[in-house]
Image: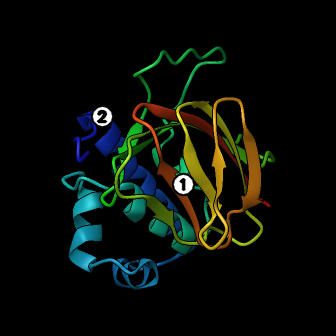
Amino acid sequence: MGERPSSDLIALIAASIRRERERAGLSLTELAKRAGIAKSTLSQLESGVGNPSVETLWALGVALGVPFSRLVDPPRPAVRVIRAGEGPATYSEQANYSATLLASCPPNARRDLYRISAQPGRPRTSDPHMAGTVEHVLIGTGRALVGPTDEPVELGPGDYIAYPGDAPHIFEALEPGTTAVIVMEHV
């Protein structure tokens, strides 16, 4: 928990936040207010000196009306291989949980692909994402409670669930070394 992303990823995130904020025509103050974060935190992130959490990046994505991936996905070649343990990972402030972006949606597509690694303990609860978002989760190893916060489903290796990502939802690892793949479908 709490690992610091690489300086390259922090610089990429800084440039992406600034680009998307300017594209949306928002001031630092207005974006910070919409995302529910301190203006000083946003300023640090845009300057490349912050250490953004999954929660902060999701809040910024929702406030900007863009998928999370648009804030963390580096340019890539036509053929891309990401080995286990590689890729732009972000870490939760509230749980032993990390999300590694594997593929973001290209223009005119509507999905992002993530590899999740989680440990038992405090669950990862998510606020609603953009309206119309659907999450698809496939458990690779371990067991987890996944889905809407008020009706999570226990899943094991090979089990799949789809649920509205625009409502509060949860991912709680029940066994050490729990992994999953999440596909976020955006409208």
Residue 147, by quadrant, is: bottom right
| 22 in relation to 4, above or below | below
Numbered mark located on residue 131 in the image: none
SS at mark 2 in the image: helix
User: Mark 2 to mark 1: distance in Å?
Assistant: 17 Å
Q: Which residue is mark 1?
A: 68
Q: Would residue 41 be seen by someone viewing this image from the given angle?
A: yes
Q: Nearer the viewer, residue 174 or 10?
A: 174
Q: Would residue 104 be seen by someone viewing this image from the given angle?
A: no
Q: Say few, some or many: other residues with alpha carbon within 10 Å of mark 1 (under 14 / 14 to 19 / 20 or more).
A: many
Q: Which color scheme is applied?
A: rainbow
Residue type at numbered disc 2: Asp
Give how far across and how far down residue 172 sits, in percent.
49, 53
Q: Which residue is mark 2?
A: 8
Give how far across and how far down residue 166 sits, in percent.
68, 70
Instruction: Give the mark nearest the N terminus, 2 or 1.
Output: 2
Q: Residue at x 64, y 61 (%)?
A: 152
Depth check, mark 2 against mark 1: the one in front is: 1
Q: Residue at x 75, y 59 (%)?
A: 163
Q: Quarter of the image for the C terminus: give it.
A: bottom right
Q: Nearer the viewer, residue 69 or 157?
A: 157
Q: Residue at x 42, y 34 (%)?
A: 88
Q: Quarter of the image for the N terminus: give it.
A: top left
SS at mark 1 in the image: loop
Q: Residue at x 42, y 85 (%)?
A: 30
